[in-house]
Image (spheres, rainbow, N blue to C red):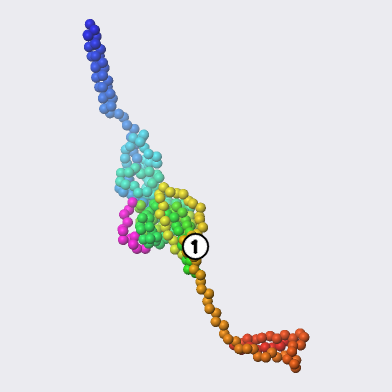
Amino acid sequence: MQRHRVLMAFGIAWLSALLLSWWVYKRTTAPQSRDLVSVVAASRDLPVGKRILAEDLKLLSLDRKDLPKGVFLKSSDLVDRSIAVPIIAGEVVLNGKLTAKGSGEGLTALIEPGMRAVSVQINEISGVSGFIQPGTRVDVIFTRTFSNGDAATTTILQNVKVIAYGRQLDPAAKLDPRDTARPTVATLLVTQDQAQKLVLAQQRGRIQLVLRNGLDDEVNEVADPVASRDLGIEEPRKPQPTIVRPVVPDPPARTSSSKNGKLEPGERVIRIYRGDKMTEETLK
């Protein structure tokens, strides 16, 4: 009797497990209704500065719960806007990767309101061997050489964004290694005051770009300029020029209106120099 009850309990437990497994399987494999939404995506690779056309876009279906922030539901909302960050084919187009409406295309689309784009000439050294590319951030160091042969260096701009290298706007584009050996230009995004300072620095001396870590946005207080004495080198002393004075002959004997050659009260003698000749006149 006891054995019969054990077998019955075991059978009920096994049957319950079987039914539970079947229910879970049917629940997980049964088709579920999805709330799909059509969003705008890129139909081809879109480089920085490109103006968006209708053929550059397509629609993708995504679950409403998976929609990222800033998506577009209609292609017409994107046409004639420009790309600020490279977008690859099939990628959902987000508002944060586009420039403002009416900002134009190319380089002008990357200039934020209130900012200016200024180009500076660089070479392999001042351009950090070509590692400066669009999207990187740099400091600008200014060096001026004085008339006495000494020089001083100071940092005039910090944490400035590079928006173009030559004519290249895309940070992901491959640069020709031969271009780094030839003088080229880097275009910096600066304020109006910074633009004036940068242009003046190029006229009065030399500038050097210093590459920053992309995560370092700290702006330090401007320190005193570094001069030769800070390197343990004394400032050169300019030799004093030798002055050659012409030999002037002895002046003639002083004359006066008095008979004995002495000046009377109220008289004064004035010397007049004409070249290497000197004369005296007595005034009363």
Quadrant of residue 21 in the image?
Answer: top left
Q: Residue at x 33, y 60 (%)?
A: 179
Residue 39, image x, y percentages? 35, 40
For the C terminus, the image quarter is bottom right
Q: Is residue 279 left or right of residue 91?
A: right
Q: Note whether 63 is above or below 186 in the view shown.
A: above
Quadrant of residue 250 in the image?
Answer: bottom right
Q: Residue most toward the bottom?
A: 259
Q: Residue at x 32, y 44 (%)?
A: 91
Tell me the residue that label 1 is attached to.
229
Residue 110, image x, y percentages? 41, 52
Q: Nearer the viewer, residue 154 or 180?
A: 154
Q: Is residue 251 left or right of residue 139?
A: right
Asked if one can make out residue 85 in the rendered structure from this viewpoint, the answer is yes
Residue 38, image x, y percentages? 34, 38
Stretch in magenta: 172-184
Q: Secondary structure at mark 1?
A: helix
Q: Residue at x 64, y 89 (%)?
A: 251
Q: Note whether 279 is above or below 163 in the view shown.
A: below
Residue 280, image x, y percentages? 67, 88
Q: Is residue 177 left or right of residue 153?
A: left
Residue 181 among magenta residues: yes
For the N terminus, the image quarter is top left
Give amino acid for label 1.
Arg
Q: Residue most toward the right?
A: 265
Q: Residue at x 24, y 19 (%)?
A: 18
